[in-house]
Amino acid sequence: MTDARKALGQVVFVGAGPGSIDHLTMGACRALTQAEVVIHDRLVGPEILELIPPSATRIEAGKEGFGPSTPQSAINGMIVGHAGAGKRVVRLKSGDSGIFGRLDEEIEALDEAGIPWRIVPGLTTAAAAAATIGQSLTKRGRNAALRIVTGHDMAGFAEQDWRGLARAGEVAAIYMGKKSARFIQGRLMMHGASPETPVTVVENASRADERIVAATLVTLADAVAGLTGPAIVLYGLAPRRAAAALPLLKEATA
């Protein structure tokens, strides 16, 4: 092994979960406490950021849909630069790194630079949000598949298999669907989805300020209108538990 190779650091891609420190894995915790540089997303919970050693360099590299964002090329450059200087780098992403996290682009940049890396998976927001409302994401006799889709991509509002999603019993976790709610609503109803299909919106999933909005497809756009935090749309699912047992805000109009 050459001296140059020995001088390289390592990058660990860590999924931080949806926000609460309770959802952080032991592997993620170990990686954080050993980090010399942590490059983190905007949505990582503050309790998790407190686990970063005081001696470590902490860099926020946030992205916001339709808002101010750190360019991906700049993030790639930061990761490669610090690891190339021999540092132990943690790339800390909210949720799971492999779900709408631009993971492949960052791995490709590291492979091109010859820098070693590994992945510590995290709990994705859909799982935490479904648990909050007392529902399973798959159910025998209801849905044999779960769709994980995005509300928008680099080109704008994202097109999906609307006809397939519109079938009765379908369940989908729609990430980044708040701003595209009316678009999603229109596309699904246009392809035959029932206006009364249950939809639950979970804002700030797993955090202290979590909010649950029970709606139907026809009221989806109104349901998200007053939400300001990150939200996931659980299409085809309604809260199972009694409303009194949940911080349930039925803000959608019937």
Image: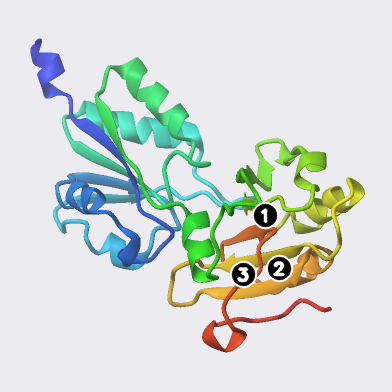
- The mark tally for this picture is 3
Q: Is residue 186 left or right of residue 158?
A: right
Nearer the observer: mark 3 or 1; the answer is 1
**Label drawn at residue 53:** none
Secondary structure at numbered mark 1: loop
Q: CA distance from mark 2 to mark 3?
A: 9 Å
Residue at the spot of label 1: 177
Determine whether 232 is above or below 85 in the image. Answer: below
Image x and y of residue 43, in percent:
45, 58
- Indicate the amino acid at tag 3: Thr
The coloring applied to the image is rainbow
Q: Write down the residue under mark 3.
A: 228
Q: Quadrant of residue 208?
A: bottom left
The residue singled out by tag 2 in the image is: 224
Residue 230's quadrant in the figure? bottom right
- Indicate the amino acid at tag 1: Gly
Dot 2: few (<14), some (14–19), or many (≥20) neighbours within 10 Å?
many
Residue at image point 84% right, 78% down: 254
* Three-letter amino acid code of the residue under disc 2: Val
Give the vertical position of 177 relative to 237 (above or below).
above
